[in-house]
Amino acid sequence: MNDSPWATEPVPAGPAYDALVGPHTRPMPIVPDAAGRDFDDREARDRGAAGFGGPPFRAETPPQEPMPSPPPPQAPQAASAPPPKKRAGRDLRAAIGVGVGLGAVIFASLLIVKAVFVGVVVVAVVVGLWELTSRLQEKKGIKAPLVPLAVGGAAMIIAGYVRGAEGTWVAMALTALAILVWRMTEPPEDYLKDVTAGVFAAFYVPFLATFVTMLLTADDGPQRVITFLLLTVVSDTGAYAVGWRFGKTKLAPRISPGKTREGLLGAVAFAMAAGALCMEFLIDGGAWWQGLLLGLAVAVSATLGDLGESMIKRDLGIKDMGTLLPGHGGIMDRLDSLLPTAPVVWLLLAAFVGTG
């Protein structure tokens, strides 16, 4: 028997042992957690969250993101530079040189013989038709027949000079008929599209140009042609100069973003001043107030003609009709404002001083 004061005597097994120890060794009940899982499930979950074989209830430390590096020191900003000065979109020197050369050819032909100037107009019309039909075929697949257009266009110019308005209309009708017949030699696909473009080209280029040669038939024909050309050029120059310097409000941004309302006002002012001078000193029987009206009409028609060709070029997806004239583009790029202005000038001069 152990004499230690802490020693206890063994309790023999049996009913007495069960009565003494049994209530205290009964297993603890399993209490489910809020999610319905018991303790063993939670322990397994914690072990799984901590990694296989890891201690229970260990929370996994989230990965730490690297601290962002400080931005590099910026150099002190200089004072904001002034906006760049406006510049012309073309080679101005080339444009002026070509313009002077064309003017010299035109004035020389007017002073030598009237027929020479008619030949200059015929050449310009045929080249313009070639440019227009070439761009139509390249960009839209439209095959406007060039041969009947060139022959009929030349015939219209000569008929306008020889027979006047009557000869012009007859030549125009015959040219349209020639276009319809010429296109019949090819397959019928796109026939309507091709002949429509051909008739349009005949009206747009040679028919409108015949009014220039009709101006020439008057006794003071060279002076009338000079007035027509001078007012158109002055209108374009005024629009460019005023628009480049003061232009802010777009005139037709979807057609020609470079044109402004201020430029249009400049075109009107310049053309009216030039018209008053031309009617007073160049046209027989003209008056300065008639020149004001003529200049106003020219500024409007020249602007509309420019916008009209801009619509055509935008539809074709091109900037210029050609590259024949450095700084200007093609012949059609110079005829755009002249063509619709010719009948306006002819009509107003006929109303003011007659056609003789």
Image (spheres, grey):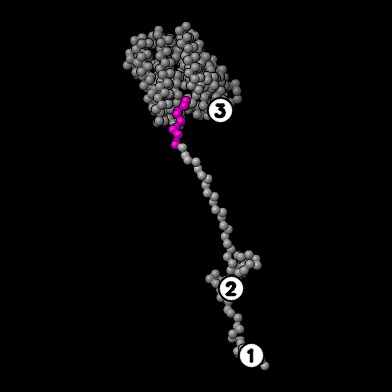
Residue under the point 50% across and 11% down: 119
SS type, badge 1: loop
Residue 308 seen from this side: no
Residue under the point 42% across and 26% down: 244
Asked whether residue 85 is drawn in magenta, I would say yes
Query: Which tag, 1 or 2, sits closer to the chain's start?
Result: 1
Which quarter of the image is occupied by the C terminus? top left
Which quarter of the image is occupied by the N terminus? bottom right
SS type, badge 2: helix
Q: Which mark is residue 139?
A: 3
Residue 231 falls left or right of residue 314: left
Q: Which mark is residue 4?
A: 1
Given contact means CB atoms under 8 Å apart, are the residues at marks 1 and 3 in contact? no
Residue under the point 38% across and 19% down: 271
Q: Nearer the viewer, residue 125 or 329?
A: 329
Estimate the spatial distance between the alpha carbons at disc 1 and disc 3, rounded to whole Å: 118 Å
Given the image, on which type of amino acid does mark 3 rest?
A: Lys
Q: Nearer the viewer, residue 241 or 157?
A: 241
Q: Nearer the viewer, residue 192 or 302?
A: 302
Given the image, on which type of amino acid does mark 2 rest?
A: Phe
SS type, badge 3: helix
Which mark lies nearer to you, 3 or 2? Answer: 2
The residue range painted magenta reads 79-88
Residue under the point 47% across and 27% down: 87
Which mark lies nearer to you, 1 or 3? Answer: 1
Residue receiving disc 2: 39
- Taking 33 as reference, is 351 above or below it? above
Estimate the spatial distance between the alpha carbons at disc 1 and disc 2, rounded to whole Å: 42 Å
Say few, some or many: other residues with alpha carbon within 10 Å of mark 3 (under 14 / 14 to 19 / 20 or more).
few
Residue 343 percent location from the top left of the image: 42, 17
Residue 257 falls left or right of residue 290: right
